[in-house]
Amino acid sequence: MSIRLYALGVGDTFTEKHHTHALLLEAEGFRLAIDCPDSYRRVLRHARDKAPPATAAALDLAGIDHVLVTHVHGDHMNGLEGVAFYKRFAQHSRLSLHTIAAVREGLWEQRLAASMGRLWDGTKFIELDFADYFAWNEVSLEQATTIGPFTVRARRTTHHVPTSALIIEHAGRSIGISSDTAFDPALVQWLAQADLVVHETNHGPAHTAYADLLTLGQDIRDKLRLIHYPDEFDIAGSAIRVLREGDVLDV
Ligand SMILES: [Zn+2]
């Protein structure tokens, strides 16, 4: 038993080389998307083109009904509108959306309602609400949250807006995901409970410098896989392993 991790998008918000932050976790046939960047079906398609052919079935939006959004920055969630429209119009269903409470606050009213709150049905405008598109499930910061076969623990990071880091477990195996965060040794220690840790690196006070990650002990560095790196990051020269788009890891 293991968790299958698909690396879909590894770049930052300024990238011209990559898609932005997106992961997909799979266990027992259940798929949980972590973040949902722009043009999400194309993100899946590009990963499908790079990943082993046997994994292609997982990388199809029709079979992805659960999305966990770590925070309301476009490079992590700009695709939510299109995915929810796809679920509504193409599949006549709702998207199961998982977030901590602070991420849910304002997500509809301040972000999505402008483009999704009103539809023309051919004769008149109809008003729609968050619950018309989304089945929302709170990811607790206090206790473990069950999402399908996964047990999810969340912890706030230090970032511009409310953001959750995650440890996602299934059958005794686990993956830590930092999402966006300033360098936080206590957070890294918490994440390092997991068997593998997907950690961001980028520039600026609200992100984690590569040089800071190099100060961590070798046992922790061995668990890390870098994501959210700038285009100029020296992947080949990195002393910490780096996720590439199309990577499929069985953890
Ligand atoms: Zn961010």
Image: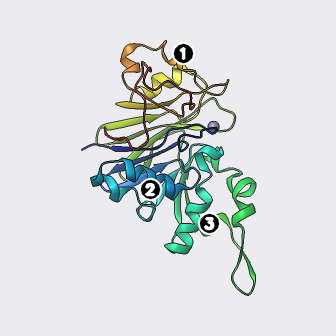
Q: Around disc 3, counting alpha carbons within 10 Å, would you say few (fewer than 14), some (14 to 19), or many (20 or more)?
A: few
- Disc 2/disc 3 C-alpha distance (Å): 28 Å
Q: Is residue 72 visible?
A: no
Going 60% across and 49% down the picture, which residue do you hit? 77
Q: Earlier in the sequence, mark 2 or mark 3?
A: 2
- Disc 3/disc 1 C-alpha distance (Å): 43 Å
6 and 190: which is toward the camera: 6
The correct choice, above or below, for 229 with respect to 6 in the image is above
Q: Which residue is most to the bottom?
A: 123
Q: Which residue is most to the left?
A: 1
Location of residue 236 by image quarter: top left
214 and 139: which is toward the camera: 214
**In this rendering, which labeled residue sits more in front, label 1 or label 2?**
2
Residue under label 2, please give it. Answer: 45
CB contact under 8 Å: marks 1 and 2: no
The numbered dot on residue 211 is 1
